[in-house]
Amino acid sequence: MQQHQTELEAALAAARLAGKLVLEEYGRFLIIPDAPANITTEVDRQAQEIILSHLRKAFPNDGFCAEEATPTLSNAARTGDRLWIVDPIDGTRGFARKNGEFSVMVAFVDRGEPAVGVVLEPSHRRLTYAVRGGGCWSRDGDDVAPAARRVSRVSTLSEATLVQSRSRNRDVPTPPVRAIQPARVVETYSAGIKLALVARGEVDLYVNTYSAFHDWDACAGHILVTEAGGTVTGLRGEQLRYGLPGAWQKDGLLASNGLLHSAALAALSHEL
């Protein structure tokens, strides 16, 4: 059996349970057209509790790192050699604005290194997942058999497609777009979706310029990209570490197909 296969199966089951609730509530949710970036909903908390409760039954001694204050999280260790990192609704603005741009993210970290990652897009019926050493896979819609996923083979920045967060004014290029000058720009709210797009080879680059964000914003998607053959680092090329106190990540993130990584880092260093 593949190492961490049991954890992968638990993560997939937990994501599906949460995704079912999220999609049901999404159908009933009253749209919030001007939802702010820091919005959270009761659905976030309910979905997180579903995920953590399921995982705790399977792995009662593991630690949990997650975004929302929920009962299971309050009674669990927040760090440790075995750590689950969860974002129950990544891209809550996409949920609140009802444009479908949100995902359920579940990751397992073994001694600081991502070992399992699951990104489920409930409204689009897209599932992308990976286990360390086992590659990146997807199941979409009514697909029964999983499909292997690989990053793209684009090798020049001028031909690349870059995915970024939704900008306030699409007529004004963001600093990453100015630096890289890609052929095409795609925008979506959810970091999980962005990282899954890179892993699936549907875009070539994702740049996050936040000076501080949390483990749950990236961990599940991180391993999708690396297992699909891509590269994920900070904006100075540094390795991302998970499970540190406070669950903070500093100085941004670059995810790429690997072929573009060095050139993208160099271009970004001149602009950011």
Image (cartoon, helix red, strand yellow):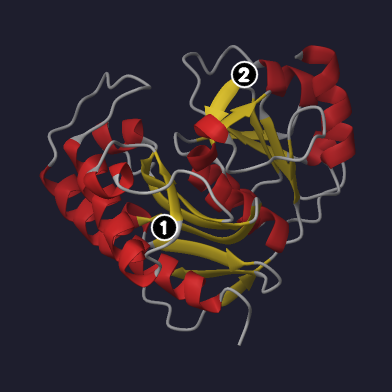
As helix, strand or loop, the secondary structure at mark 2 comes to loop
- Residue 126 visible in image: yes
Which of the two residues, 232 or 193, is positioned nearer the viewer here? 232
Is residue 75 left or right of 137 when viewed as pictured?
left
Does 258 sit above or below residue 55? Answer: above
- Mark 1 is surrounded, within 10 Å at the Cα level, by few (under 14), some (14 to 19) or many (20 or more) other residues, namely many
Q: Which amino acid does label 2 sit on?
A: Ser
Residue beneath label 1, please? 120
Does 104 sit above or below residue 163? Answer: below
Residue beneath label 2, please? 211
As helix, strand or loop, the secondary structure at mark 1 comes to strand
Point out the image quarter for the N terminus.
bottom right
Does 264 sit above or below residue 106? Answer: above
Q: Where is residue 213 in the image (x, y as percent from the top left)?
A: 54, 27
- Residue 16 visible in image: no
Q: Where is residue 99 in the image (x, y as percent from the top left)?
A: 32, 38
Which of the two residues, 25 or 173, is positioned nearer the viewer here? 25
Which of the two residues, 86 or 187, is positioned nearer the viewer here? 86
Q: Quadrant of residue 271?
A: top right
Q: Position of residue 37 (x, y in %)?
A: 38, 22
Q: How far apart are marks 1 and 2 (CA)?
A: 26 Å
Q: Which residue is drawn at 12% across and 34% down?
A: 30
Does 269 sit above or below residue 131? Answer: above
Q: Position of residue 163 (x, y in %)?
A: 61, 36
Which callout, 1 or 2, points at the residue further toward the start of the chain?
1
Is residue 5 left or right of 267 when viewed as pictured?
left
Foreground label between 1 and 2: 2
Q: Which amino acid does label 1 sit on?
A: Leu
